[in-house]
């Protein structure tokens, strides 16, 4: 066994923590399971993640179940030292609640996830400035951190609430309601939620520009083409959480449930996917794909509305900057004031109480399989309108 294989964990873990921070949040994605969202009281609880190097090892805590991000980052930096110096960690892990243990066998899957993150880092600027290609540039180091943070949170939410796991409630998230989906968003401050919203706008553009054209091969045959969803500006879309239930709005909000791995795969290979093959493959992988639409934008908006975020009139991202990327003007100074309102336990802001709800509102999804029927109907309505006007 070579030098690297003997010290693989000691070499890789600090490097991954440095280059893919916040690495503890990527670990939450890696260890996510259905049991995490079966809770009492509708509050989300992050996992404690412990790395064991050998049988009987007391383990190294890579992610705490509940701690501030600053304390967690500092703690991780200190706790890597025992591995690097070959000393046995003294951290006790007995009776650790909601704990999961990793071993060296988990390093290869983690490296695969890190490679995926790197590909998204390279893709994001292209989609962030899709409508302004002359402004496209590489992300700055602190912008990469914002991007990875948003990516991990979108990824984790999708694993829990956009896949095949049972939904915690039939209806969409609502403000002041005990819902684990909104609770997960309350862990993040307003500034970080605005960054996540900016990422979702780029995800929407990936779907609009690469997946939707595969579903719309006969658009040129209709008399009235569908409205361009991308005509809605980024800041307007952010302010309204892109509440669009048009035909194309439903399709985009359904395909937004695809996770980073699947979406990147279709981005790279979309030319090999005619319309029927694309729809059938997604249906096979996700039998309930059209059951509902994405809910992450609503969950974010609920957490923000509970904080009365519009009272402070924060500067929303625009096509040229903001969100994950810098504004490069005085608006960047607002970020510090939007970073102190995260909930340490995912509960409501101080002074608010949970309310009961009977709402079961959850719009149906649309995978585009009936798009041709809708287009024929639209064409018929257009001809009927034209003939009526002529009379």
Image: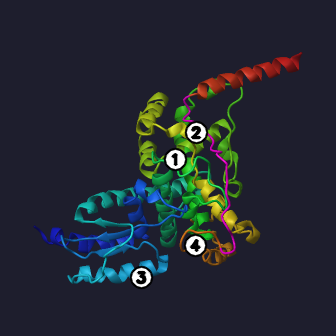
First-in-chain label (1 vs 3):
3
Alpha-carbon neighbours of circle 3 within 10 Å: few (<14), some, or many (≥20)?
few
- Residue toward you, 282 or 178: 178
Q: What element carries label 4?
A: loop
Residue at 44% across / 42% down in the picture? 266
Mark 2 highlights which residue?
365
How much space separates mark 1 and mark 3, taking CA atoms?
34 Å
Left/right placement of residue 181 relative to residue 4 reads right
Please provide percent x and percent y for residue 94.
Answer: 31, 76
Left/right placement of residue 264 relative to residue 319 reads left
Mark 4 highlights which residue?
343
Please provide percent x and percent y for residue 93.
Answer: 31, 76
- Residue toward you, 303 or 338: 303
What secondary structure is the stretch in magenta mostly built from?
loop
Q: Can residue 316 be seen in this view?
A: no
Whether the residues at callouts 1 and 3 have beta carbons within 8 Å, the answer is no
Mark 1 highlights which residue?
257
Q: Is mark 1 on a helix, strand or loop?
A: loop
Whether the residues at callouts 1 and 2 have beta carbons within 8 Å, the answer is yes
Q: Quadrant of the N terminus?
A: bottom left
First-in-chain label (4 vs 2):
4
How much space separates mark 4 and mark 1, taking CA atoms?
26 Å
How much space separates mark 2 and mark 3, taking CA atoms?
43 Å
């Amino acid at each position: 066994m070579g030098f690297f294989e003997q010290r693989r964990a000691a070499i890789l873990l600090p490097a991954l923590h440095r280059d893919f921070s916040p690495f503890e949040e990527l670990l939450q994605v890696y260890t996510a399971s259905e049991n995490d969202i079966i809770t009492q009281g509708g509050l989300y609880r992050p996992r404690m993640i412990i790395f064991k190097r050998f049988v009987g090892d007391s383990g190294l805590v890579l992610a705490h179940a509940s701690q501030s991000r600053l304390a967690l980052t500092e703690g991780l930096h200190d706790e890597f030292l025992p591995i690097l110096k070959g000393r046995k960690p003294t951290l006790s892990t007995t009776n650790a609640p909601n704990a999961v243990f990793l071993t060296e066998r988990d390093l290869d899957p983690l490296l695969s996830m890190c490679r995926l993150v790197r590909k998204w880092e390279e893709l994001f600027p292209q989609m962030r400035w899709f409508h302004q290609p002359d402004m496209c540039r590489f992300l700055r180091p602190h912008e990469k951190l914002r991007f990875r943070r948003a990516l991990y949170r979108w990824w984790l939410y999708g694993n829990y609430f956009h896949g095949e796991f049972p939904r915690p409630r039939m209806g969409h998230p609502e403000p002041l309601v005990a819902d684990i989906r909104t609770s997960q968003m309350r862990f993040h401050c307003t500034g970080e939620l605005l960054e996540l919203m900016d990422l979702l706008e780029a995800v929407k553009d990936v779907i609009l520009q690469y997946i939707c054209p595969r579903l719309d091969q006969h658009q040129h045959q209709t008399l009235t083409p569908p409205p361009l969803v991308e005509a809605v500006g980024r800041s307007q879309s952010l302010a309204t959480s892109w509440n669009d239930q048009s035909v194309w709005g439903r399709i985009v909000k359904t395909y937004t449930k695809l996770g980073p791995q699947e979406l990147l795969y279709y981005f790279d290979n979309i030319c090999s996917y005619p319309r029927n093959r694309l729809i059938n493959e997604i249906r096979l992988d996700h039998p309930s794909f059209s059951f509902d639409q994405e809910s992450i934008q609503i969950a974010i908006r609920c957490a923000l509305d509970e904080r009365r975020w519009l009272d402070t009139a924060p500067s929303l991202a625009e096509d040229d900057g903001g969100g994950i990327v810098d504004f490069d003007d005085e608006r960047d100074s607002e970020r510090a004031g939007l970073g102190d309102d995260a909930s340490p336990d995912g509960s409501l802001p101080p002074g608010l109480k949970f309310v009961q709800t009977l709402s079961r509102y959850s719009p149906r999804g649309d995978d585009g399989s009936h798009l041709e029927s809708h287009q024929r109907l639209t064409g018929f309505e257009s001809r009927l309108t034209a003939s009526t006007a002529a009379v």
